[in-house]
Amino acid sequence: MSKSEGPKAARLALAMCVGVAPVVGQAGEAGTAGFLSLRLGASGRAAGMGDAYVSLAEDATAAYWNPAGLASVTGTSFTLMHHEWLETVRVETASLAHRTQVGTFGLHFSGMYLDEIERFTSATSLPEGHFNVYEIAVSGAFGRRIFEVWDVGVAVKGLVSKADDIGANGWAVDAGARYRTKVPGLTFAAAGQNIGPELTFIQESFLLPATARAGANYQRSFPQLHGGATIAGDLVLPTDGDSHLHFGAEYVHRDFASVRLGYKANYDSQRYTFGVGLSKSGYRFDYAFAEVRNDLGTGHKFAFSIDL
């Protein structure tokens, strides 16, 4: 890492792990909460659609977005995703869901890490070594269909955050519901994410990035075009900042090729997203690009999914 990259990485480490308000405000408009990797998403399809996904998630990644969506999994679903974010931040996620007679069980793993950061403990031009920063979250989730038109779900996650030799452990809970209306293709949903106690680094405590999401999507097929379209919108209400609106659209041709667009409103550094996908015989590859302004870099997500 160059000298010019060192201060930026250090600021990002502080933002991700300690939750210093002025720094985080530039890196993601997240106010005063810490453990911000919990807000970085878990689906290439969702990222391409502006993360307007609380009502659309119905594969393994529903364990992250809205555990109620797991009820729509008909067999076994698996997704791996790699996320390049803000030049020095990497995120890896893995999601698994399997349907049983009592409902669908899901597992979700996310790990955020930064490039190595140079350690300076005195006024010198030479670093005394390097240190790492990472955050890990592991969730167990369950979703079930009730009353034919309702899905409900819950997830419990364990959290580990580490910066050099300083760390914090904690837990959080997600809960959600989906409602399929009598209008064909129209679904409403809501979820509460990251609800749990504060985490503490040494003697400094910070809130988890608790968030409420409510949204809807409408899907319609176009047989004459051999395809189908989806539009979706989410209202996102973080406990540590202003509300946000997310919008997304997708067109799928012959159940094979997909193109996606998204827009995020009321963010200082985020706005437009774009994505593409290819799907064949239960296998799917997705790519998404996210605009990040204020000289912070860009976001790229690559995901591979299997539905059996």
Image: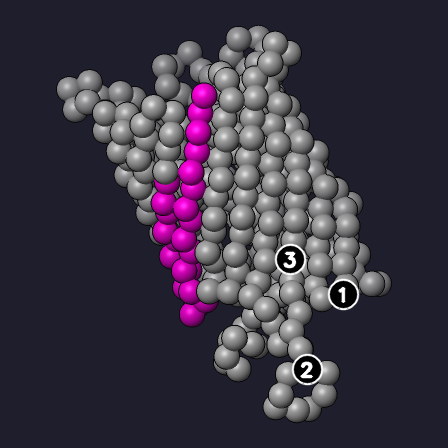
Estimate how packed mark 3 is, as few (under 14), some (14 to 19) or many (20 or more) residues with alpha carbons within 10 Å.
Answer: many
Disc 2 to disc 3, C-alpha distance? 20 Å
Disc 2 + disc 3, Cβ < 8 Å: no
Pair 2/3: label in front:
2
**Residue 182 visible, this angle:** yes
Q: Is residue 281 magenta?
A: no
Q: Quadrant of residue 64?
A: top right
Residue topped by disc 3? 134
- Residue 165 is marked as 1
Q: Is-magenta flag for residue 303?
A: yes
Which label sits on residue 128? 2
Instruction: Say the numbered circle drawn on residue 103.
Output: none
Q: Is residue 67 visible?
A: no
Query: Where is residue 181 shown, x and y percent of the image?
Result: 45, 15
Q: Main secondary structure of the magenta part?
A: strand
Q: Position of residue 81 (x, y in %)?
A: 48, 43
Per the image, label 3 sits on a secondary structure element best described as strand
- Viewer-proximal residue, 65 or 147? 65
Q: Residue at x 51, y 65 (%)?
A: 88
1 or 2: mark nearer the eye: 2
Q: Quick one: label 2 or label 3, which is nearer the N terminus?
A: 2
Sequence order check, earlier mark of 1 and 3:
3
Q: Which residues are drawn in magenta?
A: 286-308
Task: Tell me what residue is drawn at x 42 percent, y 70 percent.
Answer: 295
| Amino acid, disc 2 | Glu
User: Is 173 positioned to the left or the right of 57 in the image?
Assistant: right
Q: Amino acid at mark 1?
A: Asp
Distance from the alpha carbon under mark 1 to that under mark 2:
15 Å
Asked if the residue at tag 3 contacts the one at tag 1, i.e. Cβ–Cβ closer than 8 Å, the answer is no
Residue at 72 percent of width and 50 percent of height: 160
The span from disc 1 to disc 3 (Cα, nearest Å) is 11 Å
> The residue under label 3 is which amino acid type?
Tyr
